[in-house]
Image: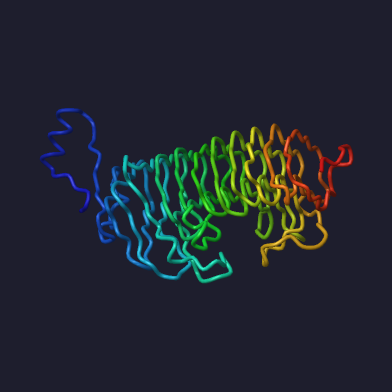
Amino acid sequence: MRCQCGEIALLLLMISSGVSWASNHVIRSIEDVEGANKCTNITISNLHVPAGVSLRLLGLRNAVVTFEGTITFGFKQWSGQLMMFKGDNVTVIGTPGHLIYGGGERWRDGYRVLGGPKPKFFEVRLNNSKIFGLRIRNTPMHAISINHSSNLTVSDIVVDSSEGDWKGAKRTDGFQYLRIKKRKPSRTAESPTKMTALQLNRELTWVFENNYCSGGPWGFPWVLVGGRKSNIVERVLVRNNIITNSFNGVRVKTVKNAEGRVSNVTFEDITLVNITGYGVTMVGNYILERGVPEGEPTGGVPITGLRLKNVHGSVNHDGSNFWVWVKNASDWSWQTNVTGGSRVPQCEGFPSDMEPMC
C-alpha cells in the first residue's frame, strides 16, 4: 500500500480543518517499503522480512512508525541489519500485543562474533526522536544499535533473549551505542537478555536509567573504549539499574595500546544480584581482537572522574567483588558495598590519593 490522498479528499480536509493531511502507509510485505519514507504515519503490520534482506526506512522526517502484530525474519548467515531506521523527528512505537521476533536461535553457534556471520537486529540513526514500547524476543546478536544519533530517548523496551541461556546465545547485547553525536539523553527499560545489557563505544552526555538485566557473562554497563578513530566516553550517568544472574556486574574496559579517554562517568544506585565472576571491574588491558584482557595495562585511555555511588549487592563465593587493573587513573570516588566473593585478583592503578578498595 502506498501513501496517497485524492485531490477531493485533500480539498475537503483543507476546507474543513484548515490544516494539511497526514499521509498513511501500511507495510505488510517487503515490497510495501518503497515510498514509505514520504509518509508521516507508517504502520508495520504482521510483516515477514525475507532472508538476507533489511527492513530499511531511511530519510524519515516528522514521522510516526508503529509496529503491530508479529514481525518475523528469514534466516541467512550474513553481517547486515535485520532492520535500520534513519531520520529526524521520528517516533517509533509498538501497539499492545505486538512482537518483533528475531528468531535468533537459528544463528546461535556459541561463538559470538568469532563464529558464523550474524546480523545485528535493529540499527537506528535517529535525531530528535523517541523509541518506546517495543517488545523484542530472541535477537541474533545486538538488539538495538544506536549509531550517529543525537537527542534520542529510548524507553519502555523489553528485550527477551533469555531462551539463549540454554540455546548457545552469544553477544546478544541489549543496547549498543556507537559513534554518538554530542548530546543524546537515553532513558531505557530492559528485560532479560543474554550477554551485555549495554555496550558503549563512544558517547557524549547521556543517561541510562531504570533498567533490569538478567543473564549472560558480560554484565552492564560495559564501557569499551578503544579500537576506533575517536575513543572518547564522557559525561555519562548510569542510575537505578539492576543486574542479576551474570558473570560480570559493572564494568569499564579500555583497549590496550589505544589512545583516548573515559571521563566523568557515574554509576549510581546499582544493584548486583547473583554475580558469579566480578562485581565491579575496571581494566585497561583489553585485547580487542581476542576479546580478553591480557598483560599489563598501557594507560593510553585513562579513566578520570569516575563516580561509584551506592553500587551494592552480592557476588558468589568463588567470584571477586572487585577487579581493578588500570594506569593513569585520577579523581575517583568509590562508595560501594559489594560482598560475597572470596577471590582477590589484581588490585592496581587506583588514583594515588585514594586507598585501594579491593
Whole-percent x, y for residue 140 in the image: 47, 60
Number of numbered tags placed on the structure image: 0
Residue 88 position in % (x across, y down)? 42, 44
The answer to whether residue 49 is left or right of residue 249 is left
The residue under the point 47% across, 40% down is 154
216 left or right of 167? right
Q: Is 313 placed left or right of 20 in the picture?
A: right
Q: Residue at x 67, y 42 (%)?
A: 234
Q: Quadrant of the C terminus?
A: top right
Is residue 227 rendered to the left or right of residue 16?
right
Residue at 67% from the left image edge and 63% from the top image edge: 291
- From where the camera sits, is residue 147 visible? no
Q: Can residue 44 be seen in this snapshot?
A: yes
User: What x and y, as percent, mark residue 150?
Assistant: 52, 43
Tell me the residue at 75%/48% (across/down). Answer: 320
Q: How is the image coloured?
A: rainbow
Q: Viewer-proximal residue, 35 or 239?
A: 239
Residue 284 in which image quadrant: bottom right
Q: Residue furthest front?
A: 317
**Residue that extends furthest to the right in the rendered view of this protein:** 352
